[in-house]
Structure formats: C-alpha cells, structure tokens
Amino acid sequence: MNLKDIPSKEIMPGYHGKLVHGEKMSWAFWTVEEGAEVPEHFHPHEQIMHVVEGEFEFTLGGKTKVYIPGDVVHIPSNTPHGGKALTPCELMDVFSPAREEYK
C-alpha cells in the first residue's frame, strides 16, 4: 500500500489521520491543524508518538513539554495524556493492540 492511496479521516476536530491496521497494532499518520487539541484521556493501548513536523505541546502523566521534530514519546497503557498543536503538525502514532474504533 501507499499512504497517498489511503483516505484521510478526521478522527477528532483538526486531527486528520491515515490509518493502517494490523492484527495487533494500528499505525496512524496525522496531519494536525494549528490549535487543534486532544483532551486529556487514557486508554488500554500502549502508544508511541513521533513528531515528524511542527511543535506539539503534550502532557503525559501530569508533566507538560513541547515536542519538536524527531522527538519520540512512549505512552504506557492507561496513562493520562493530551496535547495541542502549537503549529501545524505531522505526527505518527503506533498503538498496540489495534485501535478498533479507528477502523
């Protein structure tokens, strides 16, 4: 498959994702509008986030930091987290197990 052939879905306001699913994992390629926020939440999925472009303010377990291109963040299962795009962003997330609600 090629990412250009995968339709984008707006999963939440300002978060446009191209999603690839395996049996036990999901890989999300996000284009995020400046100012778009994901409220603090948690889920049973283990997650790894990678900032490809832009500046993304992210709170993990009560600690807030601004992440820039090249930064990688491990989000353990059931750990509260949320964020806001300070600039237009390109992010990648990997989730395990697969995010059934994103299919």
Image: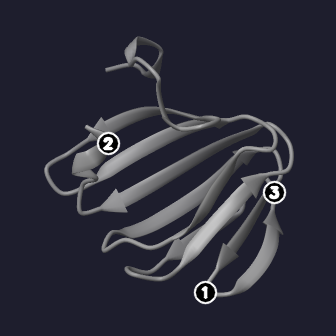
The residue at which mark 3 appears reads as 68
In x, y percent, where is residue 99? 28, 53
Q: Residue at x 53, y 79 (%)?
A: 80
Looking at the image, is 20 positioned above or below residue 55? above
Q: Is residue 70 in view from this perspective?
A: no
The residue at which mark 1 appears reads as 61
The residue at which mark 2 appears reads as 102
Looking at the image, is 71 positioned above or below residue 22? below
Q: Residue at x 65, y 35 (%)?
A: 14
Q: Secondary structure at mark 1?
A: loop
In x, y percent, where is residue 59? 69, 74
2 or 1: tag closer to the N-terminus: 1
Q: For the residues labelled 3 and 2, say whether their Cβ atoms are less than 8 Å apart.
A: no
Q: Quadrant of the C terminus?
A: top left
Residue 47: image tag = none
Q: Residue at x 39, y 12 (%)?
A: 5
In x, y percent, where is residue 46? 37, 72
Q: Which amino acid type corresponds to the residue marked 2 in the rendered image?
A: Tyr
